[in-house]
Image (tube, rainbow, N blue to C red):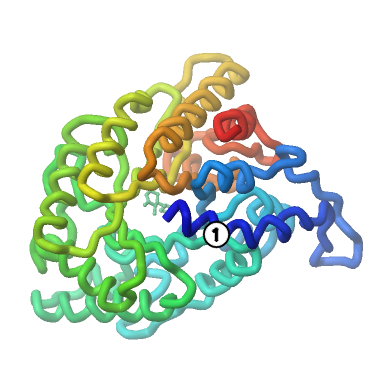
Amino acid sequence: MKRTLGIVFSFLLLFTACSSTTVQNSSSTEVASIPTPPGGVTALRDLAQKRGIAIGAAVDYNALQNEPQYAYVLGSEFNILTPENMMKFDATEPEPNVFNFVPADAIVKFAQQHHMLVRGHTLVWYNALPTWITSGTFSRDQLMAILKQHIMTEVSHYRSTVNIWDVVNEAIADNGSLRQSIWERVIGPDYLDMAFRWAHEANPQAHLFYNDYAGEGLGTKSDAIYNLVKGMLQRGVPIYGVGLQMHVSTRYYPSTQEVIANMQRLAALGLKVQITEMDVKTQDDPNPPAQRLQDEAQIYHAAMIACLAVKACEAFVMWGFTDKHSWIPIFTGHADAPLIFDTNYQPKPAFFALQQALK
Ligand code: XIL
């Protein structure tokens, strides 16, 4: 994969080098002034490409549509993206057998125009389900048919454009048991294997991931994830890798050594790993703001070092890039600054820490 990425990216260097530092303001003929790629001469994507990994962010569809500066930074600093919400079940199949790929198609088009890879997120999750699923009363066979059709339709739609899929998201509970969900309850634990087999059937080339949070270091949950994917491999299920979400905070984060050890044991099974949704909450940090930013930077740095230390770690993706559009303040109900650009699209210490780690 690293070699494949290398070949792809070498075609892109010229493109990136030609990036303009101004963009046309969509609402007028005035040319809005946009900062030079924030890191200065070398974008994160170029540094990452030299180290054989991809670097990216989740994409907020509305921001991408409405803010030229958002699109500019996204396209110039990163070479992989994940649609934050637009490929989820409720967005793509809002009514039975009625599919809507319009917003996700726009994001994929942006990725193609900027020579970025796309992480498809996510085919099977307990969350973001349309009400016709959550309030329906389906037999096991019916729900299997629904899930199969959903997966086959979505993966097929993106067969030539999306090569990475989070097939199943967050199926393990925090205590290591199989999380309760409509899929687990109606279909049973087999739903995971089925989902991977159907995704593979729709696109045999796709790299299929199991993705979860709080399983980055060592412990009950990461043991459960390890055992889950090991069992899948033993049963011949076409899983390619494990996504480590890495939603952490300046107070709670796994040590670099543990993350490396966890990545290595997954790699020893023959799997790849990617950091898929990193952000760093600072809201519980008792330190003054400037110190929080340093703590945050150090945690980003450590996570990047872990990824670079393990050959099987092929991508480093954050759950957004600007604090202006992070899900954390909405999700937690508290102000926060968990990403690497501030609300004015200025690079934070965490940005420079990533740059440093990649150099
Ligand atoms: C979050 C989005 O960021 C929010 O906008 C949405 O309201 C809820 O979902 N783990 C995941 C992501 O795998 O899909 C979640 O995204 C964040 C946690």
Point out residue 86 in the picture as x, y percentages from the top left corner: 46, 66
Q: Nearer the viewer, residue 43 or 341?
A: 43
| Residue drawn at the location 37% of the way across and 80% of the way down | 156
> Furthest-right residue in view?
30
* Quadrant in which the N terminus appears: bottom left
Three-letter code for the amino acid on which mark 1 is drawn: Ile
Relative to 204, say whether 32 is above or below: above
Q: Nearer the viewer, residue 63 or 207?
A: 207
| Residue drawn at the location 57% of the way across and 35% of the way down | 358
Q: Taking the image as drawn, is residue 235 in sight? A: yes
Reading the image, the residue beneath label 1 is 7
* Quadrant in which the C terminus appears: top right
Q: Nearer the viewer, residue 70 or 283?
A: 70
Q: Quadrant of residue 40?
A: top right
Provide the secondary structure element on which disc 1 rests.
Answer: helix
Q: Taking the image as drawn, is residue 185 in sight? A: no
